[in-house]
Image: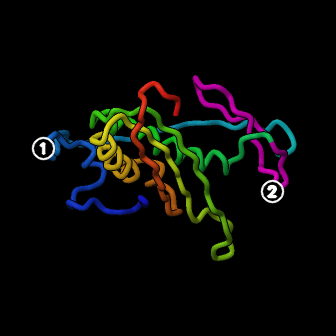
Amino acid sequence: MIRSGAAAADGRSSLSSWFLDDRGRESVELKPKRYRYETSVRWTGEHRGTMSAAGKADVEVACPPEFGGEGGFWSPEDLFVSSINVCVMTTFVSLAERQKVELVSYESEADALATIVGGELRFVTVTVRPRIYVRDERSQEEARQALERARSLCMVTLSVRPEVRIEADIRLANDPHAAV
């Protein structure tokens, strides 16, 4: 199991470890950067709305049924868990490409546990369960390493309070053309 918040074993920052050359030396000097992400929400009635961002498809959103909303819509809770799941995947894929992992497929589920803590309802854990198929044993080990690094580099997991766990299942693909 991989958990967020762990320091890099070699003392380097987890972000700098993303930029290592083939000999393990840092190959890129990081410069401070700032990014801004903007969305908007428009109330459409009852407990529903439309979420939008420039250049992207609108998403119908609502309060979840457990809080008085209507089912069948994306809720803030769904989007929270999904943002972690997507960030782990995209960070892993970027690292796997860099390490030349022969990736056959990647699928994952994620869930989060919310409970009352100090009188407030909050998420306390998020678990991401990727199923990763790779072509060969070298790729299997490289995928494990890339996934561990992905957890420590994913901007979303680094930005949230609950513990983020990754319970991976990384397997060899027997047939490169088989559906997995």
Classify residue 83 by image quadrant: top right
Secondary element at tag 1: loop
Up the image or down, 165 lies above or below 110; here it is below
Badge 2 vs badge 1, beta-carbon distance below 8 Å? no
- Report the span colored magenta: 49-71
Identify which residue is drawn at 52% across, 41% down: 86
Image coordinates of residue 108 in percent, x first then y, are 54, 44
Identify which residue is drawn at 17% across, 45% down: 26
Identify which residue is drawn at 28% across, 33% down: 100
Decide which of tag 2 and tag 1 comes sooner along the chain: 1
Mark linked to residue 166 = none
The residue type indicated by label 2 comes to: Phe
The residue type indicated by label 1 comes to: Arg
**Residue 52: in magenta span:** yes
- Label 2: how many Cα within 10 Å (few below 14, some 14–19, many 20+): few
Image coordinates of residue 105 in percent, x first then y, are 46, 34
Residue at the spot of label 1: 23
133 displayed left or right of 54: left
**Residue 109: in magenta span:** no
The one of 131 and 26 positioned closer to us in this rendering: 131
Q: Kindly report the distance in space between the C-alpha atoms of the residues bearing marks 2 and 1.
A: 53 Å
Residue at the spot of label 2: 67
